[in-house]
Image: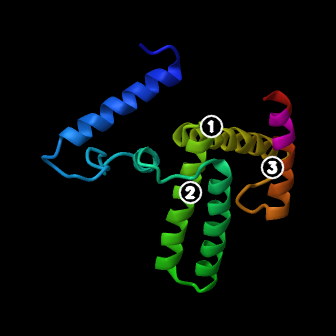
């Protein structure tokens, strides 16, 4: 009998592994049953969990952090070559690595990205309000001016968060 949430998750994972092992109709792959049509962040998390179930995983978050640095450098190099296909592949690798870090830290990548997007939106709406109060046209404002408004909005939202 499970005595903690971790025990329940462990039991659930063991049951699912056994079900996958017994369901040889589609594939022998550990990824059998992971729908490719899933949202990308969810799909990445699911296949990473499956790989981790068989031991293909970083022992801790430090490995995931290092992989992000490596993938960032590879994206920078591909972008410098002006190779759109390579840059797109490296960007995907970087995103995949960030999802892996989220998993290691115990965060849901989808929820974290949603929160970050909502925070950005709220801050930019403050930028819009500040610009309107000061009769600043966002379309013609310089990046420096927009960045200054952003810093004000950021200071305001940091205080109120």
- C-alpha gap between disc 1 and disc 2: 19 Å
Residue drawn at x 76%, y 40% as measured from the top left: 126
Q: Position of residue 114 (x, y in %)?
A: 57, 39
**Vertical side of 36 occupied by 75: above or below:** below
Front-most of residues 114 and 121: 114
Q: Position of residue 95 (x, y in %)?
A: 55, 58
Question: Label 1 crowding class (10 Å Cα cut-off): few <14, some 14-19, many 20+?
Answer: few
Residue drawn at x 82%, y 56% as measured from the top left: 147
Residue 97: give its label: 2
Residue 115: give its label: 1
Q: Are marks 3 and 1 in contact (CB under 8 Å)?
A: no
- C-alpha gap between disc 3 and disc 1: 18 Å
Question: Which residues, given as a range, are shown in magenta?
Answer: 154-158
Q: Position of residue 4 (x, y in %)?
A: 53, 17
Viewer-nearest of discs 2 and 3: 2
Q: Which residue is mark 3?
A: 150
Question: Label 2 crowding class (10 Å Cα cut-off): few <14, some 14-19, many 20+?
Answer: many
Counting residues from the start of the chain, the first of labels 2 and 3 encountered is 2
Which type of secondary structure does the marked residue at label 1 adopt?
helix
Q: Is residue 124 magenta?
A: no
Counting residues from the start of the chain, the first of labels 3 and 1 encountered is 1
Which type of secondary structure does the marked residue at label 3 adopt?
helix
Residue 15 picture quarter: top left
Does the image show residue 133? Answer: no
Left or right, residue 152 beside residue 100: right
Counting residues from the start of the chain, the first of labels 1 and 2 encountered is 2
């Amino acid at each position: 009998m499970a005595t903690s949430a971790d025990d329940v998750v462990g039991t659930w994972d063991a049951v699912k592994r056994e079900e996958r092992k017994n369901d040889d109709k589609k594939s022998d792959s550990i990824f059998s049953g992971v729908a490719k049509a899933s949202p990308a962040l969810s799909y990445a998390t699911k296949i990473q969990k499956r790989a981790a179930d068989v031991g293909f995983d970083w022992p801790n978050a430090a490995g995931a952090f290092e992989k992000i640095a490596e993938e960032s450098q590879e994206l920078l190099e591909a972008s410098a070559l002006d190779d759109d296909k390579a840059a797109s592949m490296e960007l995907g690798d970087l995103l995949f690595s960030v999802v892996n870090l989220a998993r290691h830290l115990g965060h849901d990548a989808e929820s974290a990205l949603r929160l970050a997007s909502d925070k950005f939106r709220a801050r930019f709406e403050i930028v819009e309000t500040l610009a309107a109060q000061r009769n600043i046209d966002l379309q013609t404002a310089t990046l420096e001016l927009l960045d200054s408004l952003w810093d004000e909005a950021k200071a305001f939202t940091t205080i109120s968060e």
